[in-house]
Amino acid sequence: MNIIAVDDEKIALEGLISVISKVVPECQICGFKSGDGALKYIDKNSCDIVFLDIEMRGMNGISLAKKLKLIQPQINIIFTTGYSEYAPDAFELHASGYVMKPITEEKIKIELDNLRHPLDMAVKKRLNVKTFGNFECFVQNEPIQFKYNKTRELFAYLVDRNGAMCSNGEIISILWEDSAKTTSVSSYLRNLYSDLIHTLDDLGCHGVIVKSRGRIGINPDMISCDYYDWLKGKAYAINLFNGEYMTQYSWSDFSLSDFQNDRD
């Protein structure tokens, strides 16, 4: 997550950066004491969020916000100010937030949890799984390559089961639907297990897959996952969910119906 902070007062700028860093220590923050500096940076770098003072010498925050949105329309602009009278101007700009000084960690957290343009703000672990939309999985932002497409689907189903241990029969009925439990299918399933475990182990994700007495599952605590954060009620995940879940797999419709029932 890339954030910039703009305030023409040095002490105020340093304080703002300090508070943001405590709330999201993993983010990259650049501070600027002028609108011109911020514009030059945005012109060459993508940015997710701008924390922006309004009363500044030279170009004020409202004017700067208009210019920033022309360069990056989806940028989240959060005004940080000691003046309430600028709120109508901020809302006309469709700003993401309006924070009254003094800036506190609680105020910053509230704004980050309710961004106009939501970001994936999951706590990042080595293994990151996306389920909203298509199913995708990454290790340190690099897509995972499995030997078989069915291995990916197997992993997707185990993620969907959220730590529940699954029998061979259950997995065969899901991955091969009405196919009988033949020797060839059982042999293929063993190959999938092996491919999944070895692939994750080779990527430094040992322990994600759990096997016990003919059953297999995952350790959900080792995965960053939008679905799991949605279940926990995290705001970023709730905002990210747009009605699509593991769309490439037909069996995901059962979980999707649970999503929709929970939202009603």
Image (spheres, grey):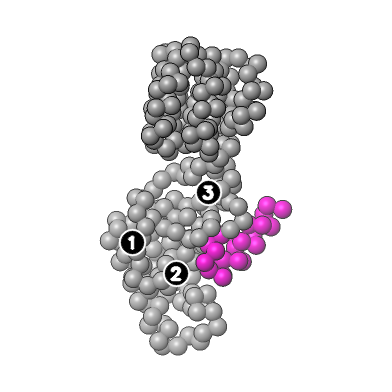
Mark 3 in CB contact with mark 2 (< 8 angstroms): no
- Residue at screen point 55% across, 24% down: 79
Earlier in the chain: of badge 3 and badge 2, it is 2
Q: Give the amino acid type for the residue marked by disc 3 in the picture.
A: Asp
The quarter of the picture where residue 247 lies is bottom right
Mark 2 highlights which residue? Answer: 154
Write down the region rendered in magenta. 245-264
Q: Residues within 10 Å of mark 1 (few under 14, many from 20)?
A: some
Residue 99 picture location, percent across and down: 57, 23
Mark 1 highlights which residue? Answer: 200
Q: Give the amino acid type for the residue marked by disc 1 in the picture.
A: Leu
Q: Is residue 251 magenta?
A: yes
Residue 139 lies, with reference to residue 184, above or below; the image says above
Q: Which mark is residue 229?
A: 3
Earlier in the chain: of badge 3 and badge 1, it is 1
Residue 74 picture location, percent across and down: 53, 39
Q: Residues within 10 Å of mark 2 (few under 14, many from 20)?
A: many
Earlier in the chain: of badge 1 and badge 2, it is 2
